[in-house]
Image (cartoon, rainbow, N blue to C red):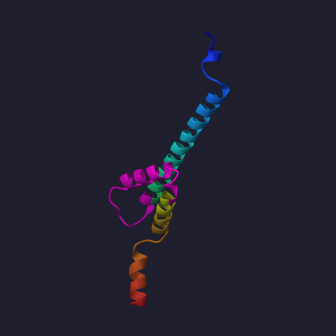
Amino acid sequence: MSTDEFFTDQQIHDFFMKGLSWGVRVLRGVAYFGVALMLLRSNSYGLLNQTSVAIAIGILGAGSASARLAQTAIAVLLFMAILPIGIFGSLRALFG
């Protein structure tokens, strides 16, 4: 019995492509986690459980259907990192 009888070329190709797809998803999840954690640590809002929030965003980013939600969360975190919490008090005093 030779090794040619176990798997066809198409089966090997499908297996490789499935592994590549899962590898890209894991890499994307890790990237979302890293960006989220960096943005959470650089904002001035004092959020508790920063690592847990970053893990949740990373898990959302790993999924294909929930990646848009993770991108929205990162956009909110970027907004929070750019605008410090004191600016909202200044805007309230200016307009209110």
For the C terminus, give its image quadrant: bottom left
Task: State yes or no: residue 51 in magenta.
Answer: yes
Q: Quadrant of residue 91?
A: bottom left
Image coordinates of residue 25 in percent, x first then y, are 53, 45
Image coordinates of residue 80 in percent, x first then y, are 45, 67
Q: Quadrant of residue 89?
A: bottom left
Q: Main secondary structure of the magenta part?
A: helix
Image coordinates of residue 22 in percent, x first then y, are 54, 40
**83 versus 21 height, above or below:** below
For the N terminus, give its image quadrant: top right
For this rendering, which residue is in front, 31 or 21?
21
Residue at point 51% right, 54% down? 65
**81 versus 60 height, above or below:** below
In the rendered structure, the answer to whether residue 89 lies left or right of residue 74 reads left
Please identify the residue farthest to the left as the structure is shown. 48
Q: Number of numbered discs present?
A: 0
Task: State yes or no: residue 34 in magenta.
Answer: no
Image coordinates of residue 77 in percent, x first then y, are 46, 63
Residue at point 39% right, 85% down? 92
**9 versus 5 height, above or below:** below
The magenta segment: 40-68
Please identify the residue farthest to the top as the structure is shown. 1
Residue at point 57% right, 41% down? 21
